[in-house]
Amino acid sequence: MVATREWSRLMVADRLGLYVHIPFCPQRCPYCAFAVVTGRMDMTEGYVQAVCDELVWSASSPSWGNRGPFDTVFFGGGTPSRLAPKLIARILETANRIHGIRQGAEITLEANPTTADAQRFGEFRDAGVNRLSIGMQSLVDETLLLLGRTHSAADAIHAYSLARQIGFRSVNCDLIFSVPAEPAAALATTIEQLLVLEPDHISAYALSVEKDTPFHRRRLQGDLPEVDEDDDATQFAQVRQHLTRAGFEQYEISNFSRPGHRCAHNWDCWTGGEYLGIGLSSHSFVEGERWWNLSDLDRYCQALQGGVSPRSGSEAIGPRKKREERIWLGLRTCEGVELEAGELAAMQSSTQMGILLSSGRLTLERQRLRLVGENFAIADAVAATLIETLERDVAVAGCP
Ligand code: SF4
């Protein structure tokens, strides 16, 4: 268990998150564009040493410095559950020693159903993990095959049952919809079975075919059909309706939770909280700056062995960029976005925004603009319109 201690350092932001990227996967799923390393399990000890070195290094970096303690920790991947639990424990102990982890912090670990094992899950819990996110994706074997997943629906249900037996305080299940050539009833079957399991949280994403993936190459060759926009919207509505009817709150466009089970880590990231990203290709954010790490495993480890920063890039987040992100992310959440007085006036002078407001798809309460329910589907389009409106207003007013 993580030993939490009194922490006297200056806390800069209200909420602080730690993201740790664990890149190891047995093989790459054909739709996956994440920073993943296949095989190379002999590298896990060395990688975890590099992660711990980076945590130590971050305390002296001018960007992160003495921020702490963390309110949330998220092990993402890749497949963090492939790592030996003692290595997860070592990372948590180092994070706690260097920056602090607040007592009661949400500590999430992504788990692949193929790694489900009572002893392993129990040791993750003993290391301090209290929230498990299971990469189920579907509960229909045919869909799992189409996705190139190496587990069955039965494996996914077994992993979920084990997580419950072990006593994680919160369990998320990941779900993918809009899978090309998926049998017509498959999504309904998955949702139905998922609801029987009674998870605390469900993340549901439409399959996105990213460049340079096997799925993308198949699509270019005409071997992978497109899911047209209408089907995609219908499936999104199907997911939303079933989950909200079953008592889940859609607190973000793709995330549904039972009361008290929102993912605090992601929520903080979406609402402007600062986070430190450790590990391969991970991103960090503090007020005014974002930076990201090298994406090559050997170069990442070598940099830290040599006492060199593993950063590969950074960007300043000026007022304009900050506003854009606040709007993009805010409109995708149930809280919407709080407009400043000038932004409110500019928005109210826009014909397009006026049409959206009078249609009832967008609501304005005091200065808070919000999309709800099925209207989440137009979040990106509304954000683009609003940002364009505000940019135009700035240009007219002659501000920089
Ligand atoms: S298990 Fe997840 S991270 Fe690993 S290859 Fe598949 S989609 Fe990518």
Image (cartoon, helix red, strand yellow):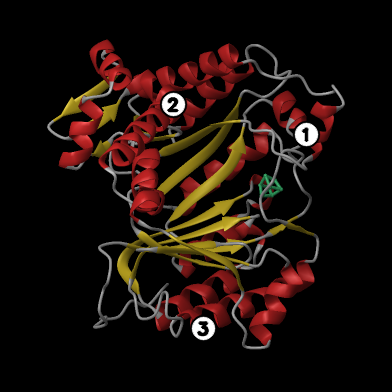
The secondary structure type at the circle numbered 1 is helix
In contact (CB < 8 Å): disc 1 and disc 3: no
Q: Is residue 231 left or right of residue 269?
A: right
Name above or below for residue 360 compared with residue 170.
above
Residue situated furthest left in the rendering: 366
Occupied quadrant, residue 303: bottom right
Q: CA distance from mark 2 to mark 1?
A: 26 Å
Crowding at label 2, few (<14), some or many (≥20) Cα neighbours within 10 Å?
few
What mark, if any, has residue 215 been given in the picture? 1
Indicate if the residue with disc 2 has its beta carbon within 8 Å of ligand 1. no
What's the mark number on residue 57?
A: 3
- What amino acid does circle 2 point to? Ala
Q: Nearer the viewer, residue 42 or 51?
A: 51
The residue wearing badge 2 is 381
Q: Point out residue 302 in the picture as x, y percentages from the top left corner.
A: 72, 80
Q: Earlier in the sequence, mark 2 or mark 3?
A: 3
Residue at 25 percent across and 41 percent down: it is 397
- Amino acid, disc 1: Phe
Viewer-nearest of discs 2 and 1: 2
Classify residue 10 as left or right of residue 42. Answer: left
* Disc 3 residue type (three-letter): Trp
- Residue 22 in the image: x percent, y percent? 62, 62
Q: Secondary structure at mark 2?
A: helix
- Residue 387 in view (yes/no): yes
Tell me what residue is drawn at x 41 percent, y 83 percent.
Answer: 97
Separation (CA) of disc 2 from disc 3: 41 Å
- Tell me: 338 left or right of 321: left
Task: For the residues labelled 2 and 1, say whether their Cβ atoms are less than 8 Å apart.
Answer: no
